[in-house]
Amino acid sequence: MTAPRTTPGPLPVAELHLHLDGTLEPEHVLELAARNGVDLPFADIDDLRSRYEFTDLQSFLDLLYTNLTVLRERADFTEMVDRYLERAAAAGVRHAEVSCDVQAHTRRGIPLETVMGGLRDALDRSVATHGVTTRLLVSFWRDGPVDEAFDLLRALVASGIPFDGIGLDSAEVGFPPELFTDVFAFAREHGLHVVAHGGEEGGPEYVTGALDALRAERIDHGIRSLEDDALVERLVAERVPLTVCPLSNVRLRAVDTMADHPLLRMLERGLVVSVHSDDPPYFGGQVDANVDAVVEALGASDEQLAHLARNSFESAFLADDERAGYLAEVDAWLAARGGRAPL
Ligand code: HPA
Ligand SMILES: [Zn+2]
């Protein structure tokens, strides 16, 4: 007798490129605005929804930075994280390394403890509530003042509130990574992980700069690395993870259409790429929606999906035993689909 065939759930993945501030659904934005008495420049939900058409990175950031002003109380930040983790768990996310633009909140007068305390309240019980392990990264605006970022990082370290690393995001072109050399050196000296966006709208020199000046352990996006063969060789040789967000790239017009997306070409060149969601409600969904888009437009096979999922766990800041457990889940997912893991 053969064993009953198990239907695999969604592909198990580590979400490594996710902006918490970018997880508020439009309904939640309006709910929080009403609760906190925040005036927004939108007439109603239809008006707000109609703004989710972007021409480039900046047009998206303008909406994102307006919407995140509805977050005011500690419980708001907790609620945002809880709702995100619930959706992520349903989408197959087993481990999430989530980032927050804390600076976007402190600079409008929200105390550091309110922001970080609210995030921690949800993250600290995430395994019990959602079955998802987490890490927290604090991202800094590369187009903001370097001194502001440095002051905030010092305050974060002095606060004793746990977080695992820092990142660099917001408008890329014209704001090279070298500006943040000292900020990142300070973070590394304090035992923090360091990641940085690069090669999203900016060219490959932004990726090289993030590696050389910031010693970034992972590059968020990195798709424009393909324009520099020597850089590709280096990324392959040094096994630098690139956290790619296909739906985001198309919606922000970094890539023309999903059919043109370089994800599988990157995988074939030996780059350590994995699939992530960036800011799910803004770009059309969680990791599972990104995976579906890649299957539909690029014809990714189950073996390729398992490779991408394995890369996500290999690229995560996980302990070896945690990682091994998650990698076994990927093998089980592939086996249930009739595929065979590489020896
Ligand atoms: O994809 C992104 N790039 C830069 N900044 C961001 N802030 C949220 N998402 C992004
Ligand atoms: Zn991003």
Image (cartoon, grey):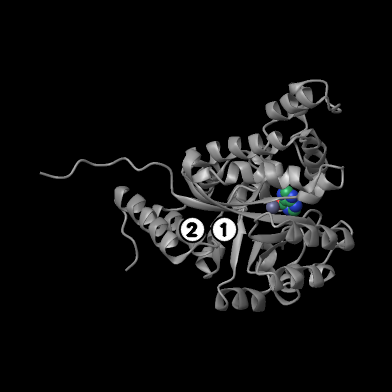
Residue 77 is situated, as x and y percent measured from the top left of the image, at 69, 38
- The three-letter code of the residue at mark 2 reads Leu
Q: Residue at x 69, y 26 (%)?
A: 27
Regarding residue 252, the answer to whether it shows in the image is: no
Residue 49 is situated, as x and y percent measured from the top left of the image, at 73, 28
Residue 141 is situated, as x and y percent measured from the top left of the image, at 81, 55
Q: Residue at x 62, y 73 (%)?
A: 232
Residue pointed to by mark 2? 308
Circle 2 Cα neighbour tier, 10 Å, few/some/many (<14 / 14–19 / ≥20): many
Decide if residue 92 is on the left or right side of residue 277.
left
Depth check, front residue: 207 or 139: 139
Q: Residue at x 45, y 54 (%)?
A: 305
Depth check, front residue: 71 or 44: 71
Figure quadrant of the C terminus? bottom left
Marker disc for residue 263? 1
Mark 2 within 8 Å of ligand 2, using the beta carbon = no
Q: CA distance from mark 2 to mark 1?
A: 10 Å
- The three-letter code of the residue at mark 1 reads Leu
Q: Is residue 236 above or below residue 192?
A: below
In this rendering, the count of numbered labels is 2
Q: Are marks 2 and 1 in contact (CB under 8 Å)?
A: yes
Decide if residue 127 is on the left or right side of residue 136.
left
